Image (cartoon, rainbow, N blue to C red):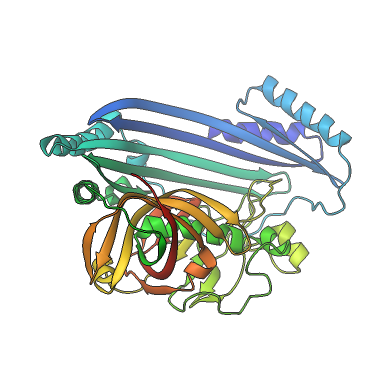
């Protein structure tokens, strides 16, 4: 913290009167990786990085550095000022923002989590590995812990600081030709249900042995939280980002206030509280706002930074990413409103369906309707008459997310934290008419 404060003073002094913004970030990250029931890697990294944006009369320049010695700072800012003088003027470039009152941050820093030791991570891995050895299963995965401090300041008076801790436990279990998976991210390591996750991954691996092949076609699909979050990440990024909206690339264009999705679907971007909480300010030091994206299937709004808000003749919602950026403001703290019932209830309510644990290799095909392709992974099952009938081989899907979430049949009652692009708090869902375009041989 002292290093950052001292560097800010020096950078602003060296900027010599031009507008200057500094984004300083200190990351402490430690990772334990395991495979074949043994720990294969322990690494820890601490780094502090500075990004300096200079602005003057329609010109802008940016320099990045990872040291804060007087010599390094002087060289970087001198280089930045020289680059600034050579830039062409951009009449659309806004001056740096002035300070605004910031909302209180959610409680997302826990010193115990930030200080987790390798021994603690090893013990949690050991619990899974011993259970797997006993049942002749094999465990793979990672357990990552750490903290992140971000400071955003400019020489017009903006000063914002945020500190959070993190822990992500991810476990994959193999049982012969069966695979199971479970993952849980948390700010507080004590919120991670390790035993439940281990049991879930092991049970799925056992249940998914000897999978059968299914014909491609349209199926009712039951998406566990992470699978649903994978699709929703693309839907929210490409549908509710202010730049995509302004450029006419978003399905929200011309559809604000219209029903595009199932009435069972409600989504908001909320960095201020809940499982998807995070920075209470954006990357220009402006206050984040809670934004309703979808209410009962009706498209309600998009997120903006100062630049896209000006173009759209509206107000910023405080969603700027580091400037300059190619994608514009994005919703990265997404929360989906839960419905009712458990995953088991979603299964019981299905006639014939495919239960999906996880997707991978998901890619965007057509941005405007968010058509995507990807594959199932680590536990895919056929459901018949409200019961899991048998495991199936992984299948590839090709599906518009806009169309898929218009066919939501049921939403689970518990939203789980997921990490995709940013954070998503998401329940399980059952959707009709989901298109599986091909099956695989594994």
Question: Is residue 272 in sight in this rendering?
Answer: no
In screen coordinates, is 126 left or right of 60?
A: left
Q: Residue furthest front?
A: 215
Residue 260 in picture, x, y percent from top left:
55, 75
Q: Which of the 4 image quarters holds residue 408?
A: bottom left
Left-right relation of 251 to 174: right
The residue closer to the viewer here, 391 or 315, is 391
Look at the picture and state if 387 lies above or below 117: below
Q: Is residue 76 above or below residue 222?
A: above
Q: What residue sits 62% from the left and 45% below the top?
A: 152
Q: How far across and how far down the image is residue 357, in percent?
A: 33, 54
Q: Is residue 33 left or right of residue 88?
A: left
| 11 and 404: which is toward the camera | 404
Query: Quick check: 305 above or below 315?
Result: above
Q: Residue furthest top?
A: 71
Residue name at image x 17 percent, y 38 percent? 132
Could you say where residue 172 lies in the image, as x and y percent from the top left? 29, 42
Residue at the spot 34% in from the left edge and 26% down from the top edge:
42
Q: Is residue 251 above or below residue 154?
A: below
Q: Position of residue 309 (x, y in %)?
A: 72, 63
At 68% from the left edge and 22% from the top edge, which residue is drawn?
72
**Residue 246 shows up from this direction:** yes
Split into 4 quadrants, where in the image is the C terminus?
top left
52 on left or right of 275 = right
Q: Which is nearer the eye, 313 or 279?
A: 313
Asked where in the image residue 43 lies, by quadrant, the reply is: top left
Question: What count of labels does the image hold?
Answer: 0
């Amino acid at each position: 913290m002292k290093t950052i404060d001292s560097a800010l003073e020096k950078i602003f002094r060296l900027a010599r009167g031009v507008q200057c913004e500094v984004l300083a970030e200190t990351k402490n990250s430690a990772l334990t990786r395991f495979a074949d029931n043994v720990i294969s890697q322990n690494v820890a990294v601490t780094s502090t990085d500075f990004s300096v944006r200079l602005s003057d009369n329609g010109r802008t320049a940016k320099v990045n550095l990872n040291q804060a010695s007087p010599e390094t700072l002087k060289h970087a800012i001198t280089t930045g000022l020289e680059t600034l003088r050579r830039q062409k003027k951009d009449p659309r470039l806004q001056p740096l923002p002035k300070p605004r009152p910031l909302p209180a941050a959610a409680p997302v820093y826990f010193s115990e989590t930030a200080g987790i030791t390798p021994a603690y991570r090893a013990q949690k891995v050991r619990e899974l590995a011993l259970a797997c050895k006993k049942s002749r299963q094999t465990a793979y995965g990672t357990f990552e812990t750490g903290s992140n401090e971000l400071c955003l300041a400019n020489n017009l008076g903006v000063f914002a600081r945020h500190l959070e801790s993190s822990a992500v436990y991810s476990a994959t279990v193999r049982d012969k030709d069966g695979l199971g998976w479970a993952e849980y991210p948390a700010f507080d390591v004590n919120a991670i249900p390790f035993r439940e996750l281990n049991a879930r991954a092991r049970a799925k691996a056992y249940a998914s042995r000897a999978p059968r092949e299914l014909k491609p076609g349209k199926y009712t699909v039951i998406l566990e939280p992470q699978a649903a979050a994978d699709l929703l990440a693309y839907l929210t990024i490409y549908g509710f980002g202010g730049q995509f909206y302004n450029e006419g690339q978003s399905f929200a264009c011309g559809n604000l206030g219209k029903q595009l999705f199932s009435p069972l679907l409600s989504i908001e971007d909320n960095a201020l509280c809940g499982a998807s909480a995070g920075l209470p300010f954006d990357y220009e030091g402006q206050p984040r706002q809670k934004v309703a994206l979808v209410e009962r299937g009706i498209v309600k709004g998009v997120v903006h930074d100062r630049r896209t808000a000006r173009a759209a003749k509206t107000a910023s919602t405080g969603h700027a990413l580091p400037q300059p950026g190619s994608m514009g403001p994005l919703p990265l703290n997404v929360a989906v409103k839960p419905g009712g019932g458990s995953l088991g209830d979603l299964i019981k309510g299905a006639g014939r369906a495919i239960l999906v644990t996880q997707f991978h290799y998901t890619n965007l095909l057509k941005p405007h309707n968010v058509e995507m392709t990807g594959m199932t992974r680590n536990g895919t099952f056929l459901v018949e008459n409200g019961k899991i009938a048998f495991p199936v081989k992984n299948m590839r899907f090709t599906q518009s997310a806009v169309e898929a979430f218009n066919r939501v049949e049921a939403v689970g009652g518990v939203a789980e934290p997921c990490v995709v692009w940013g954070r998503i708090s998401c329940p399980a869902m059952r959707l009709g008419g989901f298109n599986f375009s091909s099956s695989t041989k594994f």
